[in-house]
Image (spheres, coloured by chain):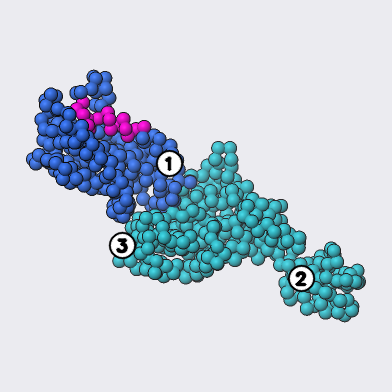
Amino acid sequence: MDTNAIYVLWLRDVKRFFRAKSRIIGTLLMPVFFLIGLGFGLGSIVNLSVLGISGNYLDFIVPGIIGMSLLFISIFTGSSVLWDRQFGFLKEIMVTPNSRVSIVIGRIFGGATSALLQSLVIIVIALLIGFSVHLSLMTPLFIVFALLIATTFISLGLIFGSIISDFQGFQLVTSFLTFPLFFLSNSIFPITTLPKYVQYVMYLNPLTYGVDGMRIALTGSGMFPVWIDLLALVVSTLIFGSIAVYAFKKVDVG
Amino acid sequence: MIIEVKKLEKEFGTLRAVNNISFNVKEGEIFGLLGPNGAGKTTTVKMLTTLVKPTKGTATVAGYDIIKDSNNVRKSIGIVFQDPSLDDELTGRENLEFHAILYNIGKKERKKRIQEAFKLVELEDKADVLVKNYSGGMKRRLEIGRGLLHEPKVLFLDEPTVGLDPQTRRHIWDYIQKLSKEKKVTLILTTHYIEEADYLCNRVAFIDHGKIVALDTPKVLKDKLGGDVVSLQINSGIERLKSEFRKKKYVKTISNRDGFLELTVDEGEKKIPEIMATAQKLGIEVSSVNLHKPSLEDVYIYYTGKTIRDEGGEGWKGMMRSRMRQR
């Protein structure tokens, strides 16, 4: 493992993250609109207690919105491979004596760090508009879940970024992918409200477990035991991560 | 031999981009791969730098096999790519720093070498500016500085001056010569600019359709064409002068065309006084003298039967045509 390569690629992403102020604001806008629109707008007519879920709707959807923003940012981060190929920086990395695995890990760490920072900002905004965190021993687990969600979906983004070489194609595929992943999870409504056959699809979605885990960490209650959420995400990270390494090894830099 | 290429071949589908080429590069020399776009230069470089795997054959770079020992090859080489390969969102210094870390250079050494690199390519005052604010020539210089940071044994320069204005090109040439002298690094240069190869390279290989058609020093290649051409414009007495020159040993061939008498000689500039004296002795008035030394361009035409610009496509056609007329 080439720790230097991992460190450099991580540092590069973090530096670029803090430099691209407009991008930070841009990626924060959508979750904030969702928070306000759904949290207040829809929240006033939703009664979760019918489903046996305590607390108000805003508390319910904050982890979901964070999950959404993690999903979108992570898949977008995967597209950095495409940009690097376009601007030639990929070649510079590829001719250095560093293993492809380290390069993938560095990119994932870098992307996950900036995704985590953004989700922390969303929590602060949510707190300002009335979200309340249920502090417990579980609360720090939020960071673990946020990082695992990011790792899973950055890997997914890297897979597509490595296979697809044009931007339009990448955008088409990812938008076809991100919205179903978002809606077919428990981000904005409880799974149990949907027909059985849709529920099965949702059980296959890593985001479902990620959001559930963050919900346990932030509000104290979820639909699965926390260890199931953790296990599911670790498995999805390993699967997508390995495929990402494989796909990245095949990338044609010529 | 720092590079030994043995029967290297690369096929892309049905296209044979590089066709069974072999050559050696000596330590410390500036070696040029010259040919039109699409001749196989860049593919050759990509194979030698381990970015692309050869279909057949192999090569050793700095003693390491490019297929079996690619990681050690990567440690021994530096590359300046044809297209920019910098991170625009980072400063020049950060680009160099990241590169140095990727090559495991310790912090203290890193600082020293980066300072040196900026000095070498004269970008000290731009070190902390974001690369997206650099001009094309500055980017290229930064890349050259970066390529040297890990002190490679061999530095590959793929079309180092393509897309740069003539003045900047001259600048880059100076840097390349400077670092060849100061750093003692072996340089492999690909180009489709004949002047560039002529000006910079110790030895040049002409590549056409994936094959090496000629390889030698620019001087030897040019000498093979038979020497310089001195053409004299004469109004009368051409035949008399011709028979006089036939007696002279130093004149290799004689021909006349549109009132011009053309003599092929070695070292034309030294023969002109003698030629003039001969004409004067016969009382023949010479109204103009023109000396044409064969260029690498002429060598290229000789070996491939076409001009490099026909395929390279980058202007200058008028100039070429007038040069061709002289031959």
Disc 1 and disc 2 on one polypeptide chain: no
Q: Residue furthest left?
A: A136
Chain B's colour is cyan
Marked residue nearer the N-terminal end (2 or 3)? 3
| Foreground disc of the pair 3, 1 | 1
Residue B128 on image: x %, y %: 35, 64
Chain A's colour is blue
Q: Are marks 3 and 1 in contact (CB under 8 Å)?
A: no
Residue A155 visible, this orientation: no
Please state the total of marks drawn on the protein image. 3
Q: Is residue A180 magenta?
A: yes
Which residue occupies 37% across, 55% down?
Answer: B89
Type of amino acid at the residue the image marks with label 2:
Asn
Q: Which mark is residue B290?
A: 2
| Foreground disc of the pair 2, 3 | 2
Residue A40 on image: x %, y %: 19, 36
Magenta-tinted stretch = A176-191
Q: Are marks 2 and 3 in contact (CB under 8 Å)?
A: no
